[in-house]
Image (cartoon, rainbow, N blue to C red):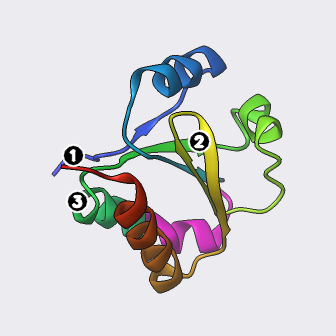
Amino acid sequence: MPSSTFEISSMEELDLLLTSTNSPLVMYFYADWCTPCELMSPSIEEFTEDFDDMKFVKVNVELRKDIKSRYGIEIVPACVILNQGEELYTFYGARKDALQDVLSQIQLNYCYE
């Protein structure tokens, strides 16, 4: 199965995405050298199916230092969760169950059928 997330390649691409989506956006910040990121990546892919009413994107902090700086990311893995451009929550670490709880709460409050 192909990846359900896609890599943000520029600040312009991110800004376009922020203005064009009405569902919560989960930005997953990672680095290729980061072992906890390697452990968390499969969970992020799993969450794209479990939380299909949210949009998931990946941001490589080594390639997109501008986006990393915009959101103040100093530690990876990290997820910044936004709704219509507004930051709702920033999650740090490779704790799948804890992130799943956060996403479930966001889904309850911000996803509508």
Q: Position of residue 6 (x, y in %)?
A: 40, 37
Precedes in sequence: disc 2 or disc 1? 1
Q: Position of residue 73 (x, y in %)?
A: 79, 51
Mark 3 Cα within 10 Å, few/some/many (few <14, many 20+)?
few
Q: Which residue is mark 1?
A: 2
Q: Position of residue 8 (x, y in %)?
A: 53, 31
Mark 2 Cα within 10 Å, few/some/many (few <14, many 20+)?
many
Q: CA distance from mark 2 to mark 1?
A: 18 Å
Q: Which residue is mark 3?
A: 49
Q: Bounds of the magenta span?
A: 31-41
33 sits left or right of 96 in the view: right
Taking the spot 55% from the left edge, 45% from the top edge, the residue there is: 82
28 sits left or right of 67 in the view: left
**Residue 6 within the segment the image draws in magenta:** no
Front-most of 108 and 28? 108
Tell me the SS state at disc 1.
Answer: loop
Q: Nearer the viewer, mark 3 or mark 2?
A: 3
Contact? badges 3 and 1 (CB < 8 Å):
no
Q: Nearer the viewer, mark 3 or mark 1?
A: 3
Precedes in sequence: disc 3 or disc 1? 1
Q: Amino acid at mark 2?
A: Val
Name the mark on residue 46. Answer: none
**Residue 37 within the segment the image draws in magenta:** yes
Mark 1 Cα within 10 Å, few/some/many (few <14, many 20+)?
few
Tell me the SS state at disc 2.
Answer: strand
Front-most of 81 and 2? 81
Q: Which residue is mark 2?
A: 59
Magenta segment's dominant SS is helix
Q: Is residue 102 above or below residue 13?
A: below
Query: What number of labels is visible?
Result: 3
Precedes in sequence: disc 3 or disc 2? 3
